[in-house]
Structure formats: structure tokens, C-alpha cells
């Protein structure tokens, strides 16, 4: 077995999965930065990942792996050339690779530094050290466990949570939202996976309940460009409501670094916004449908609630991500979750000071 540099002078993380996975990986990156403050901490990620984390000062630099090209070796070469000015020593540099993909494994091999990865990762046999993932742990804890060979304690690994530093509001954030001093609830009704989306009519019913029973409050709706249609549907009923802001498709990832910590509570599907909330320890109500909490993607906020169907469904979970459409065509895992069921958890998490 190859010896690992300990303490390392340079740590390169490779995480090129979805945005939520990248945010969850900050649990390990931030812990490494705390434990090895003299080291340089690098991240190889997607363009989206760079946009999400470029303000985080615990990262020395971020490099983009272009996953859109079919020429792997060219994009690997581009990453290696970007790293070259850092003059990283083979003896003092370590790659930590939580991403399980073959592409990431080949990149780690191409870069030529000692690698720590999971035992179930593609080409794990090429790694200097392999960690068996504990399926009972949260994903962020599993990622942080890759620091075990560097003698980081189990207690520190268990305590590590996703971490993002907040930013100031950009000028394009509505002035009345920036000046709003009441309790602000954020809704994130979208998802890249169709069946992970609680039906929009249920979000409409929930929003109506909150405005009727929890007033005065503010509501901001978040999402990306592909989810603009969700906001337009909500606007049909709530656009004239005071302290209602539909920002779907109108914000950047930088804006989330202001809007999420500015919120008192987040109501969200199983999506990246839930992990942003964990990174800021914002109270979270998370709705699970085709996926289940046992997969390890639950909220890490101190105040949290998981809402699931009250039905016992033999078809659930139906996949690791949730397919675009319900394979059984009934979508009971989501349709059976009522607005009142979610609203009760919202009320429970809002403490007396906020109500």
C-alpha cells in the first residue's frame, strides 16, 4: 500500500456530480481545511460547482472538468495544465475522491497523486487507500470519513456538516425583500427529477395555509431557469400578495448564499436547496416521495422535519434518484402527502419567537 502524505501540503478533492452532492462535499472540504490549515485545498468540479463555491475562502482554488466533451484525455490534460503552476509535489499531495464514477477514477490516475476513495468506487483498486462506506451514515458524513486515513477523529467526522459562508445581497434582489424584517419562508418546489417534485397544487395549498394562518410572514420561491413555469403558476394565485416574491429563474447560485441564510425556514423537495439549508443550519421541512431518508440525503439542520407518504407502498423507493415519471403511473408516494401534513411541520419548526 502506498503511503499517504500526512500531514498533506495539498489536498485535491474530485467531485463532479450534481449540485447537491457538491454542496454535501463541503462537509469534508471544510473539515480538512480546519484540520490542515497550512495545506492548500483544491476542488476539481463542474462549472456549476465552481459557480456555487467560488466565494468559499477555505478553498485555495477550483478547477473545472468539462464533462460535455467526449475527449476525456483532452479535458484531463486541461485540468492537469491548470494545476501545473501550483508545482504540486507528488510526495506532499493527496487526492480525495468521493465521486464514484469511472471518469473521476481515471482523472485521479491521470493526475498521478496518491488517492483516497470509497471501496465501491470505480477502479478503487488503483487508490492508495480505500474506505468502506457506512450505508447507515449521512452522505456528508460518509464523504468526511475519507479523511480517516489522515487520523481525523470519528467524532470530528460525525460532527462535520456541509458549510457555506453567507454573502451580501446583490442589487437585483428586490429592495423590499432585502429590507424585510419579518419571518421569511423559502419554498423550493422544483427538482431535476420529475417524481421528486411534490405536486404544485399541493405547494399552492400549503402557501395559502401559511399566508392565512401564519401572517404576517414573507414567502420567497426559489428555483432555476428550467423551473420558471412553476413560479408562473404560483403567481396566478399569489402575485398580488404582499411580501410574496417569486424569484424562480431570477437568481444566481451566489444569491442563494444570501437568500437561504436570510430565511427562517425552508420547505423543499429532495433537491440541492435542502443541502444549502443544511450548510446554513436553516430549519428545513423536506418532502420525500420516490426516494427515502435511508439513502442518506436528509437535512442536517438542527431543526428539521422529514415528510413522507402515510401509505405503505411496495414500490417505494423506486430508484436511487427518482425517475422522471412514476413507473406505476399513480404517483401515490407524493400525491398522498397533504398540504396540511406539511403545514403542521412548518408550524412545529417555527418557534414561539417566530410565530
Image: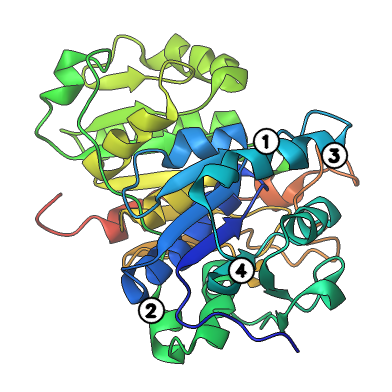
Decide: is 265 above or below 189. Answer: below
Residue at mark 4:
296
Confirm or deny contact between disc 1 and disc 4 (CB under 8 A): no
| Label 4 or label 3, whichever comes before in sequence order | 3
Q: Earlier in the sequence, mark 3 or mark 1?
A: 3
Q: Earlier in the sequence, mark 1 or mark 4?
A: 1
Which is more foreground, mark 4 or mark 3?
Answer: 3
Q: Pick whichever of labels 2 and 1 is earlier in the sequence.
A: 2
> Mark on residue 192?
1
Percent coordinates x, y for residue 152 in the rendering = 44, 86
Classify mark 1: residues with Cα within 10 Å, few (<14), some (14-19) or many (20+). Answer: some
Location of residue 167 in the rendering, given as x and y in whole percent from the top left corner: 24, 37
- Residue 246: give x, y in percent of width and height: 38, 19
The N terminus - image quarter: bottom right
Choose mark 2 or mark 1, whichever is in front: 2
Q: Residue drawn at (90%, 46%), measured in percent from left and top?
A: 328
Residue that mark 2 sits on: 159
* Residue tagged 3: 72
User: Within the image, what quadrant is residue 74 found in?
Assistant: top right
Asked whether residue 336 appears in the rendered view, the answer is yes
- Residue 258, compared with residue 16, is above or below; it is above
Amino acid at each position: 500500500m502506498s503511503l499517504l502524505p500526512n500531514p498533506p501540503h495539498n489536498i485535491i478533492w474530485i467531485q463532479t456530480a450534481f449540485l447537491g452532492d457538491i454542496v454535501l462535499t463541503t462537509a469534508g472540504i471544510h473539515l480538512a481545511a480546519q484540520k490542515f490549515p497550512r495545506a492548500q485545498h483544491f476542488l476539481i468540479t463542474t462549472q456549476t460547482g465552481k459557480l456555487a463555491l467560488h466565494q468559499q475562502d477555505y478553498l485555495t482554488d477550483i478547477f473545472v472538468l468539462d464533462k460535455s466533451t467526449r475527449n476525456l484525455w483532452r479535458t484531463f490534460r486541461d485540468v492537469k495544465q491548470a494545476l501545473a503552476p501550483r508545482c504540486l509535489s507528488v510526495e506532499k499531495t493527496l487526492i480525495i475522491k468521493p465521486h464514484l464514477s469511472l471518469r473521476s477514477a481515471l482523472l485521479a490516475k491521470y493526475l498521478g497523486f496518491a488517492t483516497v476513495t470509497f471501496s465501491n468506487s470505480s477502479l478503487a483498486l488503483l487508490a492508495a487507500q480505500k474506505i468502506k462506506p457506512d450505508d447507515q451514515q449521512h452522505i456528508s458524513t460518509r464523504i468526511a470519513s475519507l479523511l480517516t486515513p489522515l487520523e481525523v477523529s470519528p467524532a470530528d467526522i460525525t460532527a462535520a456538516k456541509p458549510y457555506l459562508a453567507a454573502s451580501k445581497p446583490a442589487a437585483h434582489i428586490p429592495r423590499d425583500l432585502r429590507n424585510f424584517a419579518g419571518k421569511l419562508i423559502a419554498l423550493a418546489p422544483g427538482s431535476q427529477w420529475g417524481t421528486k417534485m411534490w405536486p404544485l397544487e399541493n405547494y399552492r395549498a400549503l402557501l395559502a395555509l401559511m399566508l392565512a394562518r401564519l401572517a404576517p410572514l414573507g414567502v420567497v420561491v426559489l428555483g432555476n431557469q428550467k423551473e420558471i413555469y412553476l413560479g408562473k403558476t404560483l403567481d396566478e394565485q399569489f402575485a398580488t400578495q404582499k411580501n410574496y416574491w417569486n424569484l424562480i429563474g431570477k437568481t444566481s447560485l451566489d444569491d442563494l448564499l444570501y437568500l437561504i441564510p436570510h430565511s427562517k425556514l425552508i420547505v423543499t423537495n429532495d433537491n440541492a436547496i435542502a443541502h444549502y439549508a443544511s450548510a446554513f443550519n436553516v430549519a428545513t421541512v423536506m418532502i420525500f416521495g420516490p426516494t427515502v431518508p435511508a439513502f442518506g440525503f436528509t437535512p442536517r439542520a438542527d431543526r428539521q422535519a422529514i415528510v413522507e407518504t402515510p401509505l405503505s407502498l411496495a414500490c417505494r423507493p423506486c430508484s436511487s434518484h427518482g425517475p422522471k415519471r412514476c413507473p406505476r403511473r399513480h404517483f401515490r408516494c407524493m400525491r398522498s402527502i397533504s398540504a396540511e401534513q406539511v403545514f403542521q411541520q412548518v408550524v412545529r419548526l417555527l418557534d414561539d419567537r417566530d410565530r
